[in-house]
Amino acid sequence: MKVLGILGSPRIGGNSDVLLDQTLAGAREAGAEMEKIMLSQKKILGCLDCGKCNETGVCVIKDNMGEIHKKILEADAVIHSVPVYFWAMTSQMKAYLDRWCAFFDEQWNMQKAYRPKFKGKKIGLITVCGDSNVSTADPIVHSFKRTSEFAGLTWIGAVQASAGSKGEIARNEAVKRKAFDLGKEAATP
Ligand SMILES: Cc1cc2nc3c(=O)[nH]c(=O)nc-3n(C[C@H](O)[C@H](O)[C@H](O)COP(=O)(O)O)c2cc1C
């Protein structure tokens, strides 16, 4: 099993990063191979809605999304981790997610060539918000869950956490355990 972790926070060592590491540790314990991608260290431009990928399944923009696109196709599970910025996901994560456009054809069906790669692929999410009410991140959960259904992926759930200062979440053993268990679930065939 290959588990891919996608970090949408620009704060390396921050709360979403700490929880994503927990998830990847859970996946490793379950025997998976794992890789983490930090979106803020990549160049990923926004979707242009040029429609070219509808025919080819490949985006015309030459940036780092091409290599990430291939890693998503090869992974058995993809876990995203992102903080709430103004009641939504970060711009890094949104630019990345919009580029999933290249997986679909003109009718918004999964490209034929990618269907076998997406079948059975798992997807999960970690959110962190400064608000003590973790449901502040519900719009992000909605976005990923609906995208997951739309792409025919297997949704394995969301871990929603609350923390403000950098790395503060490291003291929250209960949510770290949930993130770890999400990783184990991701790595279980
Ligand atoms: C630009 C910006 C906007 C934010 N907007 C919100 C918000 O709307 N709601 C909220 O609960 N927290 C908000 N936060 C707080 C972060 O979600 C919180 O600090 C989180 O722990 C950051 O996670 P990280 O350490 O993984 O980057 C915001 C932080 C920043 C920098």
Image (cartoon, rainbow, N blue to C red):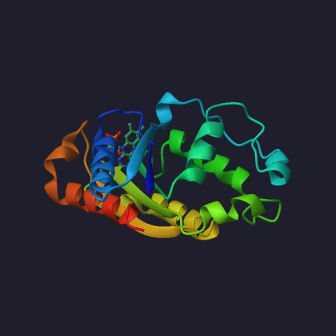
- The x and y percentages for residue 90 are 48, 43
Q: Is residue 58 left or right of residue 95?
A: right
Image quadrant of ligand 1 equals top left
- The x and y percentages for residue 128 are 33, 51
Q: Would you place residue 170 above or below residue 186 in this image?
A: above
The image quadrant where one finds the C terminus is bottom left
Q: Is residue 150 left or right of residue 61?
A: left
- The x and y percentages for residue 167 are 23, 39
Which residue occupies 30% across, 37% down?
14
Depth order, front residue of 171/129: 171
Does residue 83 appear in the picture of this structure? no
* Quadrant position of residue 156: bottom left
- The x and y percentages for residue 81 are 40, 49
* Quadrant position of residue 153: bottom right
Q: Would you place residue 89 above or below residue 136 in this image?
A: above
Which residue occupies 52% across, 53% down?
75
Depth order, front residue of 29/82: 29
How many labels were placed on the picture? 0
Q: Is residue 173 left or right of residue 156?
A: left
Which residue occupies 79% across, 59% down?
105
The image quadrant where one finds the N terminus is bottom left
Does residue 143 appear in the picture of this structure? yes
* Quadrant position of residue 186: bottom left
Depth order, front residue of 189/144: 189
Q: Is residue 59 left or right of residue 11?
A: right
